[in-house]
Every structure is written in C-alpha cells, then in structure tokens.
Image: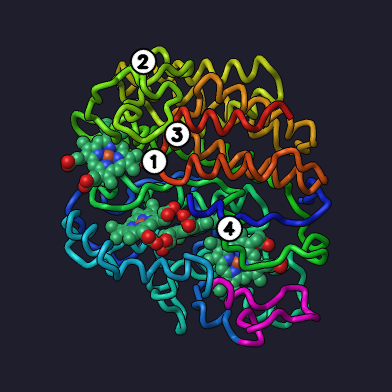
Amino acid sequence: MRHFLTFLIVTSSLMTVAPGMASSNEDIPLPMETLGAADATTADQVPAPKEDLHLGVASCAGSNCHGAARPYQNSSVVQNEYTIWNREDPHSKSYAVLLNDRSKRIARNLGLPKPPEASKICLDCHADNVPVSLRGKRFDINDGVGCEACHGGGNRYLGPHVSGEVTHQQNLDLGLYPTEKPEERAQLCIQCHVGDQERFAIHKIMGAGHPRISFELDTFTEVHKHYVMDTDYLKRKGVYSHVNTWAIGQIKAARRFIDLYNNGKHSHRGLMPELSFFDCEACHHETLVPSDPMRESHPSGKGDSATSKLLWEPRALSSNIGSGAVRFNDSGFVMTALLGELIAHDRGDQMRSAIMTLHKASQVDQPSLQQALKTIDHQLESLETDLLHHTYTVDDCHQLLRLLISRSRQNDFYSYAAAEQAVMAIEAIRATLEQQGDRSITDNSMNALRNATQNPDGFHPALFRGAMATLGSP
Ligand code: HEC
Ligand code: HEC
Ligand code: HEC
Ligand code: HEC
C-alpha cells in the first residue's frame, strides 16, 4: 500500500466542527454487453450538477490563478494547487496511463475494439469524460481526472470566483462541488474508486491485468493533497476529524458496494457471481500444498519457506462457511460494525450477526445473498443517521482501537482487503489522536502494520495479527 508512506497529518487542534458527474460519451461499441452503457441510475449516485460546461484544466492553471509556482501570501487559497496536482497527484497522469503498455495489454485482453485512450470503459474512470456537448474550448481529455472532475464544471462559477468577491456559498450555488463535506466527497470519490452504474472494475478487467482497487476516504484524501488546511481554511470551511471522515467514507462505500451487487448490472452472469465482490485471496494464493502443511517447522508462521504458504485458518465471522469456500468481501462491513459497536454493544452484535448471515447466504443462492445484503444496508442506513452529528472524542478513538485489537484476535482481518482497511482505520485514528496531543500509537506499531500490508502477495494473516498485537492495550 504505497499511499501510507506519504500519509500526511493535518496539524489542527480542532476535532470536528464543520457547519455544515457521471459521464457518458458518444457510445463506443463494446464486445460484452456488461461493459456497455448504463440503462439505469440510482438517484443517489450522481453528485455534481450535470449541465455545467467543463472548461478544462488550462482555465484553472494560470499563474495568477491556481498555477503559481510558489505559494501566495495574501490569498485565501495558496494558488499553487495546479502545480501540486500536476507534479504529485496521480489523477493528473491517469489519462497518460492509458497510453502505456499495461493499458494496451488490458485492452487487447478484453478485446476492446478501440485503444484504451478511446474506450469509454477506461475514460470514464481515467479522465473527466463528460459528454462532448459539455466540453469547453480549452477542455482537453488528456488532462486526466482534472480539476472539474471533482470541483464541478466551471462555466458558471469561474468568472465570479476569480473576482474574489463572492463567498464560498455563492460559488457552490454556481456549480462548485462541495468537496469539503465528507458525505459529498465520499459520493464523488466512490464513483470511480468503488464504482457506480456506469463504472465498475469487474473481475474481467482485473483478469485482463488491471490492478485491484481499494478505497478509504480519509487516507485517500490525505495523500497527494494539493491544498493547505491552514487557519484561514478552517475558518472558511471548518474541518471534520480524520475519524469522522473515515466513518462517513466507510458507510457510504459499504452502501455503494451493496447497491452495486443488489441493483447493479454486474452481480451475476451465468454460473458464477461477479467475482470482484468476493475476497481476492479466497481464490488467489499459493495452491501448492507444502510438505509440512502443519507448519511444524514454523509455528509462528514466520519465514518464507513453502511451509508458511498454506494460509487457511478459522475466522469467527465466516466460520459458518468453513474452508475452501469463496468468501464475499466483507472488509467494509467489518469496519462499519466497529462503528455500530461504538454506539451500542448490541448494535455491534447485530451487525456482526448480519455479516455471518451474509456468509451463510452466499453459499445458498443469489436471492438469499441479496436479502442478507439488504439487511446490512438497513443497518447502515440507520447507522448513517445516528452518526451524522457524532463528535469523535479521544475516548471514542481509544474504544475503536480496542475493538480493532480484539477483532484482530478473532481473525476478522484474515483477508488482505480487511487488513488493509484495518490499517487505514488506524491511520485515521492515529491522526485524530495526534491532533489532541495523544501519541499512544507509536511509529513502531504503525510501521509494523504498514509493512505487514505492503502488498497482497506477501500478506500473511499471522504476521498481521502480530503487528496488531504490538498496539497493546492503549
Ligand atoms: C471503476 C474505475 C476504473 C475503470 C473502469 C478503469 N480503471 Fe484503471 N484504475 C482505476 C483506479 C482507481 C486505479 C488506481 C488503483 C490503485 O492503485 O489504487 C487504476 C489503475 C490503472 C492502471 C495502473 C496505473 C499505475 O499507475 O500503475 C492501469 C494501467 C489502468 N488503470 C488502466 C485501465 C484501463 C486500460 C482501463 C480500461 C479497460 C481501466 N483502467 C479502467 C480505476 C479504473
Ligand atoms: C480527485 C479530486 C480532485 C481533483 C482532481 C482536484 N481537486 Fe482540488 N480539492 C479536492 C478536495 C477533496 C479538496 C479539499 C476539500 C475542499 O476544501 O474542498 C480540494 C481543495 C482544493 C482547493 C482548496 C480550497 C480552499 O478552500 O483552500 C483548491 C483551490 C483546489 N482544490 C483547486 C484545484 C485545482 C486548481 C485542481 C486542478 C488542477 C484541483 N483542485 C483538482 C479534490 C480535487
Ligand atoms: C473520475 C474518476 C475518479 C474520481 C472522481 C476520483 N478518482 Fe482517484 N483515481 C482515479 C484513477 C483512474 C486513479 C489511478 C491513477 C493512476 O494511477 O494513474 C486514481 C488514483 C487515486 C489515488 C492514488 C492511489 C494510489 O494507490 O496511489 C488516490 C489517493 C485517489 N485517487 C484519491 C481520490 C479521492 C480522495 C477522490 C475524491 C476526492 C478521488 N480519488 C476521485 C479516478 C478517480
Ligand atoms: C472465485 C475465485 C476468484 C476470485 C474471488 C477472484 N478471482 Fe481473479 N481469477 C480467478 C480465475 C478463475 C482467473 C483466471 C485464471 C486463468 O485464466 O488462468 C482469475 C484471474 C485473475 C487475474 C489475472 C491473472 C493472470 O495471471 O493473468 C487477476 C489479476 C485477478 N484474477 C485479480 C483478482 C482480484 C484483484 C480479485 C479480487 C477483487 C479477484 N481476482 C478475485 C478467480 C478468482
């Protein structure tokens, strides 16, 4: 997980205050009906006003605008946002990526009729792929995921906001997207980072060579940041704590994941369900059974001899499906269950029991699985309401940490996806605690956790539990 190494911590003493695009293109014919254009949308899924013209990154990047080489002193925003985005943010390279050999190979393997940089399926996530009718004169698809893919088409707000005489609210009224609000930001990012009716990284794409996709709102917001949250920013926009952002992102992402399975067009095809809803490692790990399967020569699971490669072990949450089964990816649900438990113990129990029901149902048939997901979605819906105005205290952070440690002992984070989510949760908790001067999560523990989840191939559940144990009881 390369993002952790550059994880930045916002220095602010505020815990939480805070007052408060979907795209389409001239339709490219695709080989598989599942890769075609959407025939349905869910109201909730399109965050930005769709009718504003996108003027292009060039319209934002002037040296008097957001393209300053050095920070401005007397301006409310630093004005080097373009410079940073261009230099450090992978979104500025996301179109260029489509021109590389890996992308060519993916497109070839998928049998796309056009090269990746001309294929809607790739452009929808790798660029600001608004309809041609919404592209201004300086719009350039080569800009990748440009300013307006997130901040909204600039047609109406560009002029007024350059004058410097309008308020943030006025900008919002003119089509600027409220990226500062975690709920709205979550809806924005998960369009591409989890998926929506138009965009979804199905297993067929990964099978063709696309990297696995994961997301956590707070961590993904903090890396490659192109803006500064100084005192002025906090005054203008308020700030949500890292844990608050994490919590909102988890609930939104989990609900989207359910929606995509239950109402998306990708849930099932023929004999097999869509595999990208399941734990990758349920299928992808070493299958060569070693000569020492009981790991007697490596009781700790340490060492990289073949003996430590046989992974399966019991896990309380999915114990009802036993070994050799394809597990539904519950990594997001496991995180939200921690939030349920934070509110009330029996709430956490109910959520965990719903996850167990889900695993059971996943071995029966699709309607049972969908029903189980519906139950989880209802729980998440009320959790979302109950947490809307929750202020995460230092005690809450420690409680979440204790829960993470005890869930680790029950082997909840047995899959890489779940372990990765646990580590990102701990990053958010740590950042929030440090803002309060609490440094109880040490560098050593944090680094051990990052190392244990460095990449899926080297992931070993026992080593991860060891790293979690170093957190001790805070
Ligand atoms: C649902 C959104 C989505 C779709 C559809 C999609 N991608 Fe991606 N792609 C991503 C994201 C997100 C990443 C970054 C993954 C990460 O590293 O966390 C990525 C990463 C990549 C990478 C690796 C980039 C790097 O810097 O190493 C390549 C190559 C790539 N995509 C090519 C393609 C091609 C070709 C297509 C079309 C067939 C495509 N993608 C379709 C979202 C998408
Ligand atoms: C992937 C989404 C994304 C892209 C692409 C993006 N931004 Fe942002 N931007 C954000 C988020 C999230 C924030 C932080 C929340 C906020 O203050 O709105 C932000 C903050 C900002 C701010 C700080 C505002 C303040 O009040 O201090 C400016 C200015 C800005 N972006 C300009 C740009 C420009 C210019 C570009 C293109 C070169 C760009 N952004 C590209 C998501 C994005
Ligand atoms: C239009 C689709 C789109 C939207 C919206 C979007 N992203 Fe991305 N994001 C991508 C793609 C594609 C990549 C991969 C770029 C590459 O590697 O070339 C990416 C990469 C990233 C990465 C780097 C991941 C890594 O493994 O290094 C981060 C962090 C990220 N996005 C955060 C965000 C956040 C936060 C938001 C919301 C504010 C957001 N993105 C919105 C498409 C999108
Ligand atoms: C139910 C089992 C199953 C699950 C779950 C699963 N896969 Fe696969 N995967 C397969 C099969 C089968 C193939 C095809 C292997 C072949 O053609 O040789 C494959 C192929 C791949 C390949 C191409 C490998 C190659 O050598 O070309 C990648 C990459 C991949 N999967 C990634 C993923 C990711 C990421 C996930 C989780 C989001 C995932 N898979 C989940 C069964 C699965």
The residue where tag 2 is placed is 321
The answer to whether residue 273 shows anywhere in this view is no
User: Which of the two marks, 1 or 3, is nearer to us in this view?
Assistant: 1
Q: Which residues are magenta?
A: 63-85
**Of marks 4 and 2, which one's residue comes earlier in the chain?**
4
Task: Indicate which quadrant contains ligand 4.
Answer: top left
Residue type (three-letter) at the residue carrying disc 3: Ile
The answer to whether 125 is drawn above or below residue 388 in the figure is below
**Of marks 1 and 4, which one's residue comes earlier in the chain?**
4
The residue where tag 1 is placed is 458
Q: SS at mark 1?
A: helix
The residue where tag 3 is placed is 258
Kindly check if marks 1 and 3 are in contact, taking CB atoms under 8 A apart as contact: no
Residue at 74% x, 30% y: name it: 474
Q: Nearer the viewer, residue 286 or 346?
A: 286
Say whether mark 1 is within 8 Å of ligand 4.
no
